[in-house]
Amino acid sequence: MVKTISSLQNPFIKQLVQLKEKSKLRKQTGLFVIEGKRELSLAIKSNYRIETLYYNPNLFSASEAASLEPYGIDVIEITKAIYEKVAHRDSTEGVIAVAKAKNFDLKNLEFKSKTPLIIVAEAPEKPGNIGAILRTGDAANVDAIIISNPLTDLYNPNIIRSSVGGVFTVPIAMGSSEEVIDFLRKNNISIYAATLQGSVVYDSIDFKKATALVVGTESTGLSQPWRDAATTKIRIPMQGKIDSMNVSVAAGILVFEAKRQRKFS
C-alpha cells in the first residue's frame, strides 16, 4: 500500500528539502535528489539505486508510481502543496526521487575501447557549463568525462537539470589534476590541452588514437600542470574581438572534430 504524506513538517520531507539544498548533506549521506520523468528513467537505466519516490497524483499517476515498486523503490504520495514546496522547478511532471550517489573515483573508470575518447574539464564551476559539458559528452557518446580539481558537487540540482540527465548516462570520474594526468599517462592516453597560446590548430591533430581533450576555465584557462603535461597544446582559431569562448562550446567543437575523424563510430 502506498504511503501518503500531507505535512511539510514530516521528517522525510524535511530531509528531501535539505538534500536538494545542501551539498554537505548529500556528501554525508551519499544521497541526492532527482526530479522529472526523463531524468528518473535515465537514472534507473544507468543502474542508479532509487531509494524513495515521491509523487503528486495530480501530475504523476498512481499507476506510473506503482510500476516502479518492482524496482524495490519506496513509493510515497505527496500533496500538491508539498510538491510545490520541494520541487526545484515547475515542469518536473510531479515526481521527485531520492537516489544513492555513485563513486566517481578514477580507479572505477574502465574503457571498453582501446582508443577511448575523453573530455577532461579542469575546475569547472558554473552548474550550467558543467551540465552542458555532460550533455555534449552524451551526444558524442564519449568514453568518459573527467572533472579535475572539482569545485562543485555533480549532484547539484542545477547540474542535473542543465545536463538533462547526462550526469547519469556518461561515465564520470573526478580527481586532482595530478591524479588525472597520472591516470591518463598510465593508460597511454594522449593529452590535448586547449589553450589560447596553443601552437597547433585543433583540426590538424589525429584524434583517432586514445585521446583526452582538456579544457580549462573561461577566466584563467588551463593550469600549468596541464600545459606541461600536454602531448600537444591545441587552439581553436578565434576570428572575433573576444579572445575566449564558453568552455562547453569549446569542448563540443573539439569532441565532434574527434568524432568526425572517427567517422562517428
Image: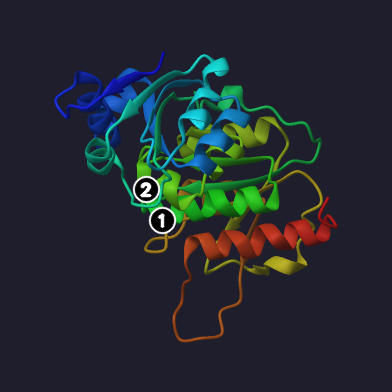
In this orientation, does residue 198 appear? yes
Label 2 element class: helix
Above or below, 74 against 57 in this view is above
Q: Residue at x 54, y 68 (%)?
A: 197
Q: Which mark is residue 158?
A: 2
Q: Which mark is residue 198?
A: none
Residue type at the position of mark 2: Asn
Label 1 element class: helix
Discs 2/1, front: 2
Residue located farthest toward the left when viewing the structure as drawn = 9
In the shown orientation, is residue 229 left or right of residue 20? right
Q: Quadrant of the N terminus?
A: top left
Which x, y percent locates residue 205?
76, 62
Q: Earlier in the sequence, mark 2 or mark 1?
A: 1
Q: Circles 2 and 1: CB distance less than 8 Å?
A: yes
Which x, y percent locates residue 126?
36, 54
Which x, y percent locates residue 248?
52, 60
Quarter holding residue 116 = top right
Q: Residue at x 83, y 55 (%)?
A: 262
Q: Which mark is residue 128?
A: 1
Quarter holding residue 81 = top left
Q: Residue at x 68, y 45 (%)?
A: 142
